[in-house]
Amino acid sequence: MESIKSYVRYNETHKILICLQHKHAIAPGTGLKRHFQRQHPEMSSGTRQKILESVKDLELEDVDNVVIPDPEEYPIADIEVKNGFACRHPECDGFYAGEMSTMAKHCQRKHGRQDNDPICWTEQTVQTIFQSNTSLKLANIVR
C-alpha cells in the first residue's frame, strides 16, 4: 500500500488538504472521497480508504471559509502558481481567473463587455486553491 504522504499534505495555516499530484486543495466532506475516486482511478481502494481514514480528524475549512492570502504574502506551499488574469473594471471588487476564457465570460456577464470592447483585465500570477465543478477559489500573487 502506498504512503498517503505521496498523495496529500495538510496545510495547517489555511486548514486545507492539498492534492500533491493536482496541486490544489480538495474540498472537505464528500469532496475528498469524490476527488480520489474521480481523479485517481489508479489508486487502490485500500490506499483511498487509508487516506480518508487518516484525514478524518483534521480540521478542514469549508471552501467558502478559506481565507485568501494577502497578495503580498508568499504563495501557499504545494499549490501551483501560474499565469492568470485579474479584472480591472472600475466596478469590480477583485475577480481572478486562471484562464482568459473565464475572465472574458466574467467581464461579459458582470460588466456587459462586448467582443469588440477593450479588454478590462490584466495578466496576474494566481493560485487556484480549489478547483472542481462546484468550487473554484483563486488567490492572486504579487511577484
Image (cartoon, rainbow, N blue to C red):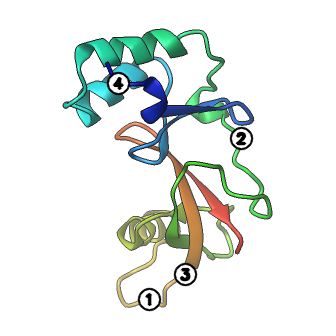
Q: Are marks 1 and 4 in contact (CB under 8 Å)?
A: no
Asked which secondary structure carries label 3, the reply is loop
Number of the front mark, 1 or 4: 4
Q: Position of residue 121 (x, y in %)?
A: 55, 79
Residue drawn 45% across the image and 69% down it? 103
Rendered-image quadrant of the N terminus: top left
Give residue 67's mark: 2
The reply to whether callout 3 and callout 2 are in contact (CB within 8 Å) is no
* 89, above or below 34, in the image: below
What SS does tag 1 mark? loop
Q: Indicate which disc residue 2 carries.
A: 4
Of the two numbered discs 4 and 3 on the same chain, state the one appearing first in sequence.
4
Kindly check if marks 3 and 1 are in contact, taking CB atoms under 8 A apart as contact.
Answer: yes
- CA–CA distance in space, label 4 to label 3: 47 Å
Q: Are marks 2 and 1 in contact (CB under 8 Å)?
A: no
Q: Earlier in the sequence, mark 1 or mark 4?
A: 4
Check disc 4: other Cα within 10 Å, few if <14, some if 14-19, many if 20+.
Answer: few
| Residue 99: quarter of image | bottom left
Of the numbered discs 4 and 2, the one sitting upstream in the chain is 4
- Which numbered marker is on residue 117? 1
- Please say if 32 is above or below 128: above
Q: Helix, strand or loop at disc 4?
A: loop
Q: Residue at x 34, y 40 (%)?
A: 133
Q: Is residue 71 above or below residue 9?
A: below
**On residue 120, which mark appears?**
3
- Which of the two marks, 4 or 2, is nearer to us in this view? 4
Q: Amino acid at mark 3?
A: Cys
Left or right placement of residue 71 versus residue 32 in this view: right
Q: State how far apart marks 2 and 1 are (Cα).
A: 34 Å
